[in-house]
Amino acid sequence: MGTLPKPLIGLLLGTVAFFAIWMVALKPHSSASGGSQGGVGQYQPAINKAHQAVTTSNQANAKLRAPTATTAAPTPAATTNAATTNAATTSPGKPVTKVKPVAKAKAVTKAKAVPSPKPTAQSESAAAATAAQTVSNAIRAGKVVAVLFYNDAAADDRAMKSELAAIPTHGGQVVKAAVPVSQLIQFSGLTQTVDINTAPELVLIDHARKATTLVGYADGVEIAQRIDNALATK
């Protein structure tokens, strides 16, 4: 065990002496005979010595830079991490319910194109009769007429029919018709002046009712040129 410093020993002795004097002389008590309380004058020298001892001890401690009182140091506040605080104070949310992916809609089945019913002989005859009447009326009106006789079983004939359909009518000055060769009899009035010997064959009639023919396949450019020539006649 280490030796205590002398100033500290003096402080302890002074404190013990002061406490002893206080217990004996300064603590109030009642006399057995009910007389007057005793005075403190006879103990004054001892009290002064105790005070002197305390003063001496304090001065010695000051020279040694020893603390005269010890106080517990305050505990530093803990640094709070913002992320930890947020996690601690924020109540966890309810677990997110996984949304089931929407089932892909089944591919819409494309409707199969319904093939057009093949025209019957009766319907073809009726359509040809209507076309013959239209052509006759246009010739009498002095319009340019373009009549194509074609074989529906031949690819070139069908292609030429499509080319004729794309030619403009020039504001109604041109009348067009496409007739199967099987219905040639409906155009007896036309066939009396124009020989129809093959298919495809295009018959053009100008304003002067003069007829010319274009035998075999012809594209849209050639057909359009022939029609323009017919329109140019007086």
Image (spheres, rainbow, N blue to C red):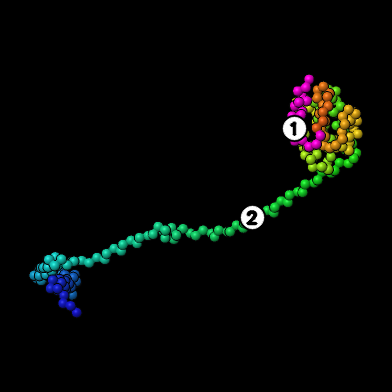
Q: Nearer the viewer, residue 31 or 41?
A: 41
Residue 47 visible here:
no
Q: Residue at x 13, y 71 (%)?
A: 7
- Of marks 1 and 2, the one in the foreground: 1
Residue 85, by quadrant, is: bottom left
Q: Main secondary structure of the magenta part?
A: helix
Q: Residue at x 31, y 62 (%)?
A: 76
Vertically, is 175 above or below 199?
above
Residue 201, by quadrant, is: top right
Q: Is 102 within the magenta?
A: no
Q: Bounds of the magenta span?
A: 215-234
Q: Nearer the viewer, residue 11 or 140?
A: 140
Q: Nearer the viewer, residue 180 or 78?
A: 180
Total numbered badges shown on the rendered structure: 2
Label 2: which secondary element: loop
Q: Residue at x 18, y 66 (%)?
A: 67
For label 1, count other residues whose C-alpha is less than 10 Å away and answer few (under 14), some (14-19) or many (20+).
few
Residue 150, by quadrant, is: top right
> Which residue does the numbered mark 1 point to in the structure image?
222
Label 1: which secondary element: helix
Q: Is residue 74 left or right of residue 227?
A: left
Q: Which mark is residue 102?
A: 2
Q: Residue at x 77, y 39 (%)?
A: 159
Give the amino acid at mark 1: Glu
For label 2, count other residues whose C-alpha is less than 10 Å away and answer few (under 14), some (14-19) or many (20+).
few
Residue 122 visible here:
yes
**Real-space CA distance between mark 1 and mark 2, rounded to the nearest whole angstrom:** 58 Å
- Residue 192: horizontal and vertical position, in percent? 90, 29
Give the amino acid at mark 2: Val
- Residue 139: horizontal and vertical position, in percent? 84, 25
